[in-house]
Amino acid sequence: MPILDRLSLGKAGEDCACRELERRGYAILARRYRSRYGEIDIIARDGPTVVFVEVKARTSSRFGEPAEAVTLHKQTRVTAMAEDYLARHRLLNVPCRFDVVAIAFGSDGRPVVEVYQNAFDAAYK
């Protein structure tokens, strides 16, 4: 795989994450949901649960593993975006969780995908 620029890598990672989530039975509700707090990569349903998904893709581990990039600061921002989404869509009393999909693209371009369910805590349990 040629070296991808950040936007191309992000899009390839999100596409790969959607395929994996759908394979696992998730229904994709939205991609790149924007609010004043930023952007949630994927919003999906896993059964009755609304899942807010952060996707991290890397072409090397030079700067750490993909999942390590979901810092406490990022978790706080994703939580604020989730609150915005739930309010705008009038989703009250629905179970929610936060997943992380970590994708490592090897030198051959093949992705290794890991899904971390319930990857961080928030007030939605």
Image: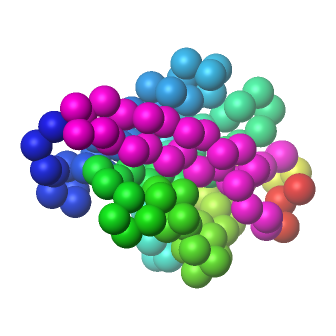
- Nearer the observer, 85 or 59: 59
Can residue 23 be seen at all in this image of the molecule?
yes
In the rendered image, residue 90 lying in the magenta stretch gets the answer no
In the rendered image, residue 108 lying in the magenta stretch gets the answer yes
Give the answer, above or below, for where 66 lies relative to 122: above
Residue depicted at 76% across the width and 27% down the height: 47
- Nearer the observer, 68 or 35: 68
**Residue 60 left/right relative to 118:** left
Looking at the figure, which quarter contains the N terminus? top left
In the rendered image, residue 35, in percent from the top left (x then y), is placed at 47, 68
Residue depicted at 62% across the width and 27% down the height: 26
Residue depicted at 79% across the width and 66% down the height: 122
> In which quarter of the view is residue 105 placed?
top left
In the rendered image, residue 54, in percent from the top left (x then y), is placed at 53, 54
Give the answer, above or below, for where 11 lies relative to 82: above
In the rendered image, residue 90, in percent from the top left (x then y), is placed at 71, 53
> In which quarter of the view is residue 83 placed?
bottom right
Bounds of the magenta span? 94-122
Can residue 77 be seen at all in this image of the molecule?
no
Give the answer, above or below, for where 47 lies relative to 60: above
- Nearer the observer, 103 or 55: 103
In the rendered image, residue 4, in percent from the top left (x then y), is placed at 16, 51
Looking at the figure, which quarter contains the C terminus? bottom right
What is the count of numbered marks? 0
Q: How is the image coloured?
A: rainbow
Residue depicted at 38% across the width and 51% down the height: 57
**Residue 10 left/right relative to 67:** left
**Residue 62 left/right relative to 38:** left
Q: Specify the farthest residue to the bottom.
A: 73
